[in-house]
Image: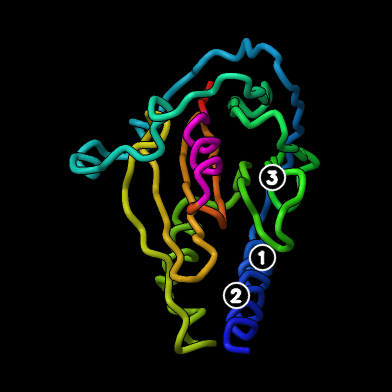
Amino acid sequence: MSKFINILSYIFLLFLMVMIAGCTPQKTESTTSGINGESDQDEVNNNDEQLPEEDWINAETVYLSDDYDYINWKTYINEELGYSVKYPADWRINDAGLSQTGELIIEPSNPEPFVAYVSIGIDNRELELIRTIYKDSDRRFRAIDPNYKPDEESKIYFSGKKSYYYITDNNFQNRKIVCPFNDRIYSISTHKNDNVLVRQIISSVEFK
């Protein structure tokens, strides 16, 4: 019963976060994508100008692709949004663009219900608003639920880019990566960070 209540509380908080995000002006952006395609988008800038170097002096690199073997894996390339990701041949992808612009869902053929294995997309909110919501800096969620625990934020390098890493204190192994790059804010998240294949998929993300 306690676990069921925790799940309901988590879903309720997610609903509140979506409602807050919906009140923020969004920009519309079309998405084109393909599997095993080629990307010809040149890298026009990096995120060094946005994020001060001194803030990342002690930042660690997480999700290293060199730690894994990708033989017989497929590659998804999104030319419009400028990224690629590898995934196991027996997993499935959905790039219908659910709650985020061009959101890509990667999951096994028989996934657990209500569990996000790997989600990649563009977050159209301002970076500081995203950080405020995840860290609950304005204590909005804690005002609703005194037991609510904000995400833990740390600065990391992800796929060679300065990023923010969030750990949620719950039973879902929830991790979120926020990467400002090429005038976009990429969002990579999972509820299954304890799954080796999930970590391998996330490690394969490359920005173009």
Circles 1 and 3 in contact, beta carbons < 8 Å: no
Q: Which mark is residue 107?
A: 3
* Side of 188 where 64 appears, left or right: left
Q: Disc 2 on helix, strand or loop? A: helix
Q: Find the distance from the CA under tag 1 to the CA under tag 3.
A: 22 Å
Q: Find the distance from the CA under tag 2 to the CA under tag 3.
A: 21 Å
**Residue at position x 68%, y 69% in the image:** 19
Three-letter amino acid code of the residue under disc 1: Val
Asked if residue 195 is positioned above or below residue 31 in the image, the reply reads below
Asked if residue 95 is positioned above or below residue 143 in the image, the reply reads above
Residue 207: percent from left, percent from top: 51, 26
**Residue at position x 67%, y 21% in the image:** 79
Q: Magenta segment range?
A: 195-205
Disc nearer the start of the sequence (2/1): 2
Q: Disc 1 on helix, strand or loop? A: helix
Looking at the picture, tell me which residue is in the foreground, 166 or 133.
166
> Which image quadrant is residue 184 in?
top right
Question: Which residue matches tag 1?
Answer: 18
Three-letter amino acid code of the residue under disc 3: Glu
Q: Which mark is residue 65?
A: none
Q: Can you tell which of label 2 and label 1 is closer to the viewer?
A: 2
Looking at the picture, tell me which residue is in the foreground, 94 or 39.
94
Question: Which residue matches tag 2?
Answer: 10
